[in-house]
């Protein structure tokens, strides 16, 4: 799984970020620090907030590659190659922090779908050729909605990249290795039905399950602990700081680079998959037009069955979203 950026050099491209709350601000800072683009346009229904974030970030810009950060409105998105949408309620404000609720972040869908009905047509009116990245929870059904509202397929969500990174971190801690040396994927929904692919997780080509067994770990116990930590990571973070923002902010900036540099990077992000009939994360190839290829990873029968259940959970949510919009 490719997840390392190239040199943080300006690439002369305009990016819009809609929503300057915790995630939008974190994504902005990450993009500045990484030199993701040449110009960032921040748009928020609260113009004063967007102006304040832009001003604050501008004062940090001299320490990073050259990036101009400005507050604007939708007309200022003209010419943007990529528009990132982070606006909407998070788990805390949307009442989705109950770990026993099987819907998880899908509970935010109705409220955030209404927000997207306002935002997406305005984005398309002023930046009709832009790729759109959906970050708002729940990102997968919202990406399906965005695709319909935009009338094109240049739409993807951050998907399970953040979950896959969390998977790698938790495995690395138990194995005493660098997380960057762990290769592990999460597919399906970015949510409670996500599927952790234990069967293909490796370190240096060695199966993670074999390495855990060699170190004397109870595999069932480790699996239960890790899956619980990953499925509810957002809530664990929200309990401490009110919003999950820094990890997903860094992920957003990294994905923006893959699009703007036409990297054809292989990453577990989500796009509409014809076979599943819904937006979900598989092994995806991300380039200038968004997700350009999608491939099923190798899975056990149990993992494949879990992926089908995850796809159904997203499909049900997306259908509810379409029904409510009629």
Image (spheres, rainbow, N blue to C red):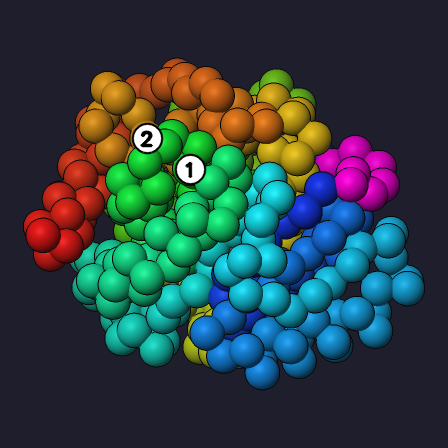
Query: Which residue sits at x=24%, y=19%?
Result: 275
Asked if the magenta segment contains residue 58, the reply would be no
x and y percentages locating residue 188 in the rendered image: 33, 36
Depth check, front residue: 85 or 280: 85
> Relative to residue 279, is residue 210 depicted above or below?
above
Label 1 – label 2 distance at C-alpha:
8 Å
Range covered by the magenta-colored residues:
5-12
> Relative to residue 4, is residue 116 depicted above or below?
below
Residue 108 horizontal side relative to residue 284, left or right: left
> Relative to residue 264, is residue 146 depicted above or below?
below
Query: For the residue carrying disc 1, how many other residues have a C-alpha within 10 Å: few (<14), some (14-19), or many (20+)?
Result: many
Asked if the magenta segment contains residue 8, the reply would be yes
Q: Quadrant of residue 258?
A: top right
Query: Which residue sits at x=25%, y=67%?
Result: 111
Query: For the residue carrying disc 2, how many other residues have a C-alpha within 10 Å: few (<14), some (14-19), or many (20+)?
Result: many
Residue 208 appears in the rendering: no
Query: Which residue sits at x=32%, y=36%?
Result: 151
- To which residue does mark 2 refer? 272
Residue 69 horizontal side relative to residue 301, left or right: right
x and y percentages locating residue 82 in the rendered image: 57, 43
Disc 1 vs disc 2: Cβ atoms closer than 8 Å?
yes
- To which residue does mark 1 refer? 155
């Amino acid at each position: 799984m490719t997840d390392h950026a190239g040199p943080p050099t300006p690439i002369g491209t305009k990016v819009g970020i809609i929503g300057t709350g915790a995630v939008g601000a974190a994504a902005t800072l990450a993009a500045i620090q990484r030199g993701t683009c040449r110009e960032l346009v921040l748009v928020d229904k609260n113009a004063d907030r967007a102006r304040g974030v832009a001003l604050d970030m501008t004062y940090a810009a001299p320490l990073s590659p050259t990036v101009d950060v400005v507050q604007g409105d939708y007309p200022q998105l003209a010419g943007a190659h990529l528009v990132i949408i982070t606006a909407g309620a998070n788990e805390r404000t949307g009442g989705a922090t109950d770990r026993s609720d099987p819907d998880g972040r899908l509970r935010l869908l109705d409220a955030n779908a209404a927000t997207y009905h306002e935002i997406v047509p305005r984005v398309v009116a002023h930046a009709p050729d832009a790729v759109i990245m959906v970050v708002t929870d729940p990102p997968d059904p919202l990406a399906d909605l965005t695709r319909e509202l935009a009338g094109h397929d240049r739409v993807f969500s951050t998907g399970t990249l953040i979950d896959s990174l969390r998977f790698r971190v938790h495995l690395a801690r138990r194995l005493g290795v660098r997380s960057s040396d762990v290769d592990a994927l999460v597919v399906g929904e970015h949510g409670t039905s996500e599927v952790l692919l234990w069967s293909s997780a490796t370190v240096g080509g060695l199966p993670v399950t074999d390495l855990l067994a060699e170190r004397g770990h109870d595999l069932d116990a480790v699996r239960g602990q890790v899956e619980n930590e990953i499925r509810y990571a957002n809530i664990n973070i929200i309990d401490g700081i009110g919003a999950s923002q820094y990890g997903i902010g860094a992920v957003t900036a990294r994905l923006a680079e893959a699009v703007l540099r036409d990297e054809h990077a292989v990453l577990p992000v989500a796009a509409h998959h014809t076979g599943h009939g819904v937006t979900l994360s598989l092994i995806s190839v991300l380039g200038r037009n968004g997700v350009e290829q999608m491939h099923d990873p190798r899975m056990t029968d149990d993992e494949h069955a879990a992926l089908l259940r995850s796809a159904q959970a997203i499909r049900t949510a997306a259908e509810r979203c379409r029904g409510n919009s009629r």
